[in-house]
Image: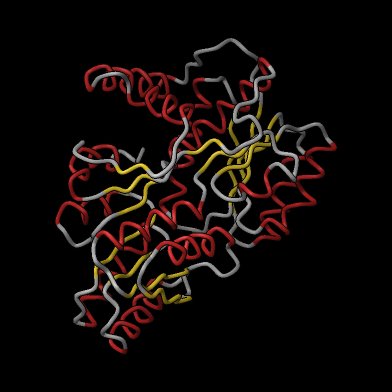
């Protein structure tokens, strides 16, 4: 790859990334083929007991980001001989109830997101009282340790936002629109906060109804039509990037569209130039390592992170990187 501008990372996260990619293109392909074959045949790579792990996320219906997280978790579950349960709800109280249900089932481990941490605190306390180990993933790094989780796997959202602000500066942008598509998601606010911290220009926040793409498109289009000074639009999720491109076209704007997260459409947009850059937090790795770390804890009482989050991003992805990643996005692992 010609350029991966990595803002933050630790040696552990890099090693985990390399373990997925392999030490060479040929070796990586062989390793992927072996994993795919193992998954297809349902064979575990270990002989430990068939523990049950539950993953409960704040994903909304149709959000492709969470398909990638889930894919990574399911792949690790096959390898680790884990019975994997997945559930999700974008309403905080309903998500908490799903965690309570997992506790009632006496699962052997829980993986949970903390997009709206206050609503999840009591449920995680119940898991702790029941002796069920918990790993938080994706969102909630600040609350993870306080809530009794073994560790957190994801990116620091503020640092990710700061990386975006710096990238906008390098591209000479002067006024950016930060599009928030989920009300009350603390991680989304942290992303915009980070952008504002390092961006030398003006940042404007736009709250949209993320459950309706037509509403998202019309809101962005209206703002671009009313403010010609906006020269960058930053969406906080990959599915919204394509919608922002359509809004730009409808508004007749020249604003650059940039986004958090990566999927096949984003990779294609980077490749054809309709998108400027993307921030990848490696969701496949988040799901995969969450299962793996719970397995390691059950098997060997191992805990990674030393009380700090295990970081999977951010990485700034540009047109130069898109071709190399396109294959992975099409198969649903990036």
Q: Quadrant of residue 324?
A: top left
Seen at 82% across and 43% down, the residue is 126
Q: Residue furthest bottom?
A: 226
Q: Nearer the viewer, residue 79 or 293?
A: 293
Instruction: Tell me the quarter of the image containing the N terminus.
Output: top left
Task: Say which quadrant the C terminus sits in.
Answer: top left
Which residue is drawn at the image coordinates 49% and 20% (left, top)? 79
Residue 207 as seen in the image, left or right of residue 241: right
Instruction: Locate residue 306, reporting x and y percent.
Output: 64, 29
- Relative depth, front residue between 203 and 248: 203
Q: Is 259 situated above or below 285?
A: below
Q: Residue furthest front?
A: 200
The quadrant holding residue 71 is top left
Give the vertical position of 120 relative to 255 (above or below).
above
What is the x, y in percent for residue 301? Answer: 69, 19
Residue drawn at x 29%, y 73% is 174
Left or right of 286 on screen, residue 307: right
Residue sitting farthest toward the right: 129
**How many marks can you see?**
0
Asked if residue 68 shows in the view, the reply is no
The residue at the point 35 percent across, 72 percent down is 201
In the displayed structure, would residue 44 be above or below residue 203? Answer: above
Q: Residue 91, percent across and down?
A: 63, 62
79 to the left or right of 235: right
Q: Can residue 49 be seen by looking at this rendering?
A: yes
Position in image of residue 237 (x %, y %): 41, 59
Extreme residue in the top direction: 47
Left or right, residue 114 beside residue 167: right
């Amino acid at each position: 790859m010609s350029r991966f501008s990595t803002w933050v990372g630790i040696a552990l996260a890099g090693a985990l990334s390399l373990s997925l990619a392999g030490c060479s293109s040929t070796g990586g392909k062989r390793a992927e083929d072996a994993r795919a074959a193992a998954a297809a045949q349902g064979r575990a790579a270990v002989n430990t007991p068939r523990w049950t792990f539950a993953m409960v996320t704040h994903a909304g219906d149709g959000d492709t980001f969470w398909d990638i997280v889930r894919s990574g978790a399911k792949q690790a579950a096959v390898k680790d001989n884990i019975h994997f349960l997945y559930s999700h709800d974008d309403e905080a109280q309903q998500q908490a109830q799903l965690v309570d249900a997992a506790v009632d089932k006496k699962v052997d481990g829980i993986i949970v997101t903390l997009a709206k941490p206050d609503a999840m605190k009591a449920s995680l306390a119940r898991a702790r009282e029941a002796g069920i180990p918990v790993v938080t993933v994706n969102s909630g790094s600040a609350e993870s340790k306080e809530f009794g989780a073994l560790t957190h796997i994801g990116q620091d959202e503020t640092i990710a936002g700061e990386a975006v602000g710096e990238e906008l500066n390098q591209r000479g942008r002067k006024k950016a629109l930060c599009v928030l598509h989920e009300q009350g998601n603390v991680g989304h606010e942290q992303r915009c906060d980070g952008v504002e911290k390092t961006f030398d220009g003006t940042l404007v926040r736009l709250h949209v109804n993320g459950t309706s793409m037509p509403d998202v498109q019309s809101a962005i289009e209206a703002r671009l039509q009313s403010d010609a000074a906006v020269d960058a639009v930053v969406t906080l999720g990959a599915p919204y990037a394509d919608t922002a491109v359509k809004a730009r076209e409808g508004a007749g704007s020249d604003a650059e569209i940039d986004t958090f997260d990566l999927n096949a459409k984003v990779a294609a947009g980077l490749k054809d130039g309709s998108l400027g850059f993307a921030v990848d937090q490696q969701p496949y790795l988040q799901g995969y390592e969450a299962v793996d770390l719970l397995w390691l804890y059950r098997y060997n009482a191992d805990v990674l992170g030393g009380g700090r989050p295990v970081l999977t991003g951010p990485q700034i992805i540009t047109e130069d990187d898109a071709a190399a990643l396109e294959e992975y996005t099409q198969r649903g692992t990036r």
